[in-house]
C-alpha cells in the first residue's frame, strides 16, 4: 500500500458513519441508548486490526453490539468499510490507544472483551505493555460489568503463562485455560473464528492458546 493510498484511506475512514476518533467520547455511557439504540450486550475487541474477529462476531450475533478498537487507521478502514458494505448495524470502530478506554466507556458499560493475538512483548522490561498486565487489567476493570469476562487467544506460550500467573496474583479468576485449542473435542463455535494472523500461526505449526477470565473487583 503506497503512502498516498494510506492517507486516502485514513481520510475516508474519518467520513465513515461507523468509525470514530476522539469525538466518540460524547458517547461514553450512552453507546446503547444513542448510537445502537437498544439495550443489548456490548462487546469490545482490542487491537482489532482489520476487525476480522469483530466482524465475524457481529455476523453471528445480531442481538449483540461489537466495537473494535485499534490505533492503525489503515487497518480500521478495511474493517469499517466491510461492515458498511455488508450492512452490519451492530458494529462500530474507534481509532485510539487502548490506554484511553475509560475515556470512551463508562463503568459497567461493557459486557465482554476480546484480545486476539496481541503483541506478546516477551522482554521483561516491556511487561507493562502486555495487554494482560496489571496496568491494562486495571483499565478493563473500570469499564467491565462485575460479571463481565475477558477472552485471550494467543500463539505465545510466554504470554499464556504470564496471563495465568498475573490473574492468580489476585487480579482475576480463570474460567477456562486451554493450552492447545484445536485439540479440544467439543470446541465452542466462537473460538473457531480464525484471523489472518491465526492462520499463519497454524500453518507454522504453532499451538493456539485460549484463556477466559473474570476480573476481581476492588
Image: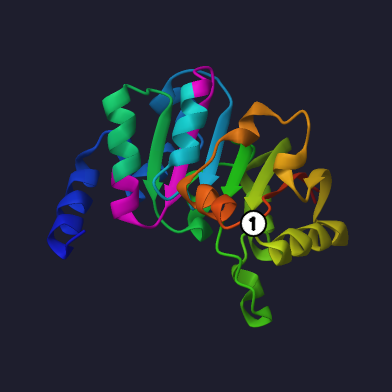
Residue 120 in the magenta stretch? The answer is no
Q: Which residue is mark 1?
A: 206
The quadrant in which the N terminus is found is: bottom left
Percent x, y of residue 92: 39, 35
Write the residue at 61% across / 66% down.
120
Write the residue at 83% across / 46% down.
174
Kind of element beneath mark 1? loop
Residue 62 in the magenta stretch? The answer is yes
* Closer to the camera in the image, 141 or 6: 6
Quadrant of residue 123 within the rendered picture: bottom right
Percent x, y of residue 152: 66, 48
Please say if 128 is above or below 188.
Answer: below
Decide if residue 12 is on the left or right side of residue 40. left
Decide if residue 110 is on the left or right side of residue 217. left
Q: Which residues are magenta?
A: 60-77
Residue that sits furthest to the bottom in the current view: 125
Percent x, y of residue 87: 32, 21
Q: Tell me if residue 28 can be seen.
A: no
Write the residue at 61% across / 77% down.
126
* Closer to the camera in the image, 81 or 157: 157
Q: Tell me if residue 127 can be seen.
A: yes
* Closer to the camera in the image, 154 or 173: 154
Write the residue at 79% across / 62% down.
166
Amino acid at each position: 500500500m503506497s503512502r498516498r493510498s494510506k492517507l486516502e484511506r485514513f481520510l475516508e475512514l474519518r467520513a465513515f458513519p461507523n468509525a470514530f476518533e476522539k469525538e466518540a467520547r460524547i458517547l461514553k455511557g450512552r453507546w446503547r441508548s444513542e448510537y445502537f439504540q437498544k439495550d443489548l450486550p456490548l462487546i469490545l475487541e482490542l487491537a482489532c486490526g482489520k476487525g476480522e474477529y469483530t466482524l465475524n462476531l457481529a455476523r453471528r450475533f445480531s442481538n449483540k453490539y461489537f466495537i473494535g478498537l485499534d490505533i492503525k487507521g489503515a487497518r480500521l478502514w478495511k474493517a469499517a468499510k466491510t461492515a458498511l458494505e455488508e450492512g452490519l448495524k451492530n458494529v462500530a470502530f474507534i481509532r485510539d490507544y487502548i490506554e484511553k478506554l475509560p475515556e470512551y466507556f463508562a463503568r459497567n458499560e461493557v459486557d465482554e472483551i476480546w484480545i486476539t493475538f496481541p503483541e506478546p512483548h516477551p522482554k521483561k522490561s516491556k511487561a507493562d505493555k502486555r495487554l494482560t498486565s496489571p496496568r491494562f487489567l486495571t483499565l478493563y476493570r473500570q469499564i467491565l460489568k462485575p460479571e463481565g469476562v475477558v477472552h485471550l487467544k494467543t500463539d505465545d506460550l510466554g504470554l499464556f503463562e504470564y496471563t495465568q500467573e498475573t490473574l492468580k496474583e489476585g487480579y482475576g479468576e480463570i474460567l477456562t485455560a486451554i493450552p492447545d485449542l484445536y485439540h479440544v473435542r467439543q470446541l465452542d463455535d466462537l473460538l473457531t473464528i480464525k484471523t489472518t494472523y491465526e492462520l499463519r500461526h497454524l500453518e507454522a505449526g504453532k499451538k493456539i492458546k485460549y484463556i477466559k477470565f473474570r476480573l476481581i473487583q476492588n
